Amino acid sequence: MSNSHSAVGVALGLCKPCKGSRMEVRASDPDYVAKSIDCNDLFTRIAVGISYSTIVAEHVRNNHTKLNELWITPEYYSTSTQRHIGYFRSGFLKAHHSADNIFITRANCHLSAKDRADKYYAKNAMTITNAALPDVDKPRLRESTRRGTIASCINRLDVARRNMTKGIPLDAIDDDTFMDLMATTHFLEMLQETPDIDAVRAAVNAHLALNSPRNS
């Protein structure tokens, strides 16, 4: 008999193997967990939450803060999978873990970099941001649409900054990447505070020109 979605969600919070009709929790091998902690790894994967056949959530121990974290994929899947993610989030909270330790990160399923603080993710966020910024200067768009693009970029970089710094020892943070991240965020915040949308469009064009690979 399969377990309910709610029960599987709670099982991830408790790090207990559990299987439902479309959701599953798989716990890590105890030997791996013990070795990872003994080796002083920054993070130790304790269990994963699976929707159908895809890992969408990961219960992780932060060995620096000694706190448990839930890493949730930012990828958007089907409506049912999004509901499953909601059950995993709810189950983590029902197990008396803090909502402040829930992170949206691709590190939960990226095999080459299992650390949410890896500079790869922050650099990727900035790459996506620079790819989105030309939309601010597209012709025949409402001002609200242009500013909505900027707000979305700020949110993406805020998530990247939080993943890169919260609960992370200072010597594990890549300084150059962090400074680039903050500089871009401050630039976008300045744009949001600029009342003249034509000045905003001109500033975006200048920023993109300066950060073009041809000028690197």
Image (cartoon, rainbow, N blue to C red):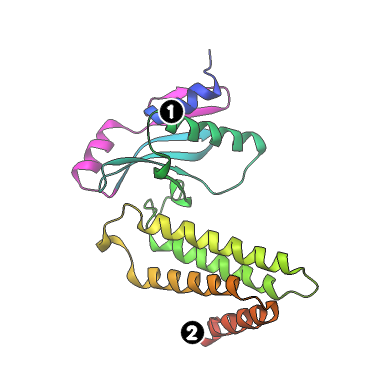
State whether residue 20 is above or below residue 50.
Answer: above
Give coordinates of residue 159: x percent, y percent. 48, 56
Amino acid, disc 1: Lys
Mark 1 highlights which residue?
94
Disc 1 versus disc 2: nearer the observer? 1
Magenta stretch: residue 7 in it?
no
Horizontally, residue 142 falls left or right of residue 129, namely right
Q: Residue furthest top?
A: 1
Task: Give percent across and percent down for residue 32.
Answer: 27, 37
Which residue occupies 36% across, 73% down?
176
Tally of numbered tags: 2
Q: Position of residue 99 (x, y in %)?
A: 43, 40
Q: Which of disc 2 and disc 1 is earlier in sequence?
A: 1
Q: Is residue 36 magenta?
A: yes
Magenta stretch in the rendered image: 15-42
Residue projecting furthest to the right: 140
**Direction from residue 157 to residue 133 in the image, left or right:** right
Q: Secondary structure at mark 2?
A: loop
Look at label 2 and name its amino acid: Ser
